[in-house]
Image (cartoon, helix red, strand yellow):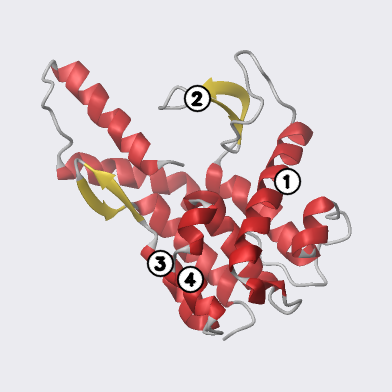
């Protein structure tokens, strides 16, 4: 979810409802919205998988790039983080969107199937995985399944460019794996009323991604 756009929309709606173009969200309102955003995600946690668990059916192009373990994690966890809409809708920027935030080849009236959304997600994850591993070649090591999955999930949310300029990438490049995993937590903020501040939904996601990242390291 694009939290900046979410809060911008809420602020815009408040200005309309109050007929006050300068109306802003109060801190209490921000806290209440944070609670609502975080609540549905907190009820569902990404699966904890090992290389020997639940992998037989999770093969395909993504698995060929990131490995079966990472592909399984990503195809299970990212929909939980992002949410899914089978019916095309316009996001707050007016862009037609479907499934887990996909904007490629989407038009008004489009209704996707679960399998169609899975294919769209896999294609987007492949594109992000390619970018992540170009920036962090160490993630190609076959022993880095969980760090690879966490990094691709992060990049899917913040963009490959931001990932490549992050302390996560720098720490991974230096072989500082635990520090790199802990650096995920810094990416939990969005601008609300012109102020950059933590958002509950992003904080929850970063904590879960860090948990995946740390698997096998501690």
Does the rendering let one see residue 212?
Answer: yes
Q: CA distance from mark 1 to mark 4?
A: 23 Å
Q: Secondary structure at mark 1?
A: helix
Q: Nearer the viewer, residue 31 or 72?
A: 72
Sequence-wise first label, 3 or 4: 4
Q: CA distance from mark 2 to mark 4?
A: 30 Å
Sequence-wise first label, 1 or 4: 1
Q: CA distance from mark 3 to mark 2?
A: 29 Å
Q: Is residue 120 left or right of residue 131?
A: right
Q: Are marks 3 and 1 in contact (CB under 8 Å)?
A: no
Sequence-wise first label, 3 or 1: 1
Q: Are marks 2 and 4 in contact (CB under 8 Å)?
A: no
**Residue 192 percent across, percent down from the top left:** 24, 43
Determine crowd level at label 1: few under 14, some 14-19, many 20+ residues with C-alpha closer than 10 A.
some
Q: Nearer the viewer, residue 211 or 94?
A: 94
Q: Is residue 53 left or right of residue 49?
A: right
Sequence-wise first label, 2 or 4: 2
User: What residue did someone put label 2 on?
Assistant: 95
**Residue 178 percent across, percent down from the top left:** 51, 82
Quarter of the image where the C terminus is located: bottom right
Quadrant position of residue 139: bottom right
Determine crowd level at label 4: few under 14, some 14-19, many 20+ residues with C-alpha closer than 10 A.
many
Q: Are marks 3 and 4 in contact (CB under 8 Å)?
A: no
User: What residue did someone put label 3 on?
Assistant: 185
Label annotation for residue 122: 1
**Residue 188 percent across, percent down from the top left:** 37, 58
User: What residue did someone put label 4 on?
Assistant: 168
Q: CA distance from mark 3 to mark 4?
A: 10 Å
Q: CA distance from mark 2 to mark 1?
A: 21 Å
Q: CA distance from mark 3 to mark 1?
A: 25 Å
Q: Residue at x 51, y 50 (%)?
A: 157
């Amino acid at each position: 979810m694009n939290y900046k756009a979410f809060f911008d929309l809420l602020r815009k709606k408040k200005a309309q409802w109050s007929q006050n173009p300068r109306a802003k969200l109060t801190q209490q309102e921000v806290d209440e919205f944070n609670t609502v955003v975080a609540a549905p995600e907190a009820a569902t946690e990404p699966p904890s998988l090992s290389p020997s668990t639940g992998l037989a059916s999770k093969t395909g192009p993504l698995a060929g790039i990131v490995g079966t373990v990472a592909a399984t994690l990503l195809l299970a966890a990212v929909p939980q983080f992002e949410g899914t809409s089978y019916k095309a809708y316009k996001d707050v920027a007016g862009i037609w969107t479907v499934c887990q935030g996909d904007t490629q080849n989407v038009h008004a009236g489009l209704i996707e199937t679960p399998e169609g959304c899975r294919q769209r997600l896999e294609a987007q994850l492949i594109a992000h995985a390619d970018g992540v591993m170009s920036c962090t070649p160490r993630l190609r090591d076959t022993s880095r399944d969980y760090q690879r999955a966490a990094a691709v999930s992060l990049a899917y949310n913040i963009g490959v460019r931001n990932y490549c300029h992050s302390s996560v990438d720098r720490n991974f490049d230096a072989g500082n794996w635990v520090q790199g995993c802990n650096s995920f937590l810094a990416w939990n903020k969005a601008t609300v009323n012109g102020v950059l501040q933590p958002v509950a939904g992003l904080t929850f996601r970063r904590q879960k991604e860090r948990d995946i990242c740390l698997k096998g390291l501690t």
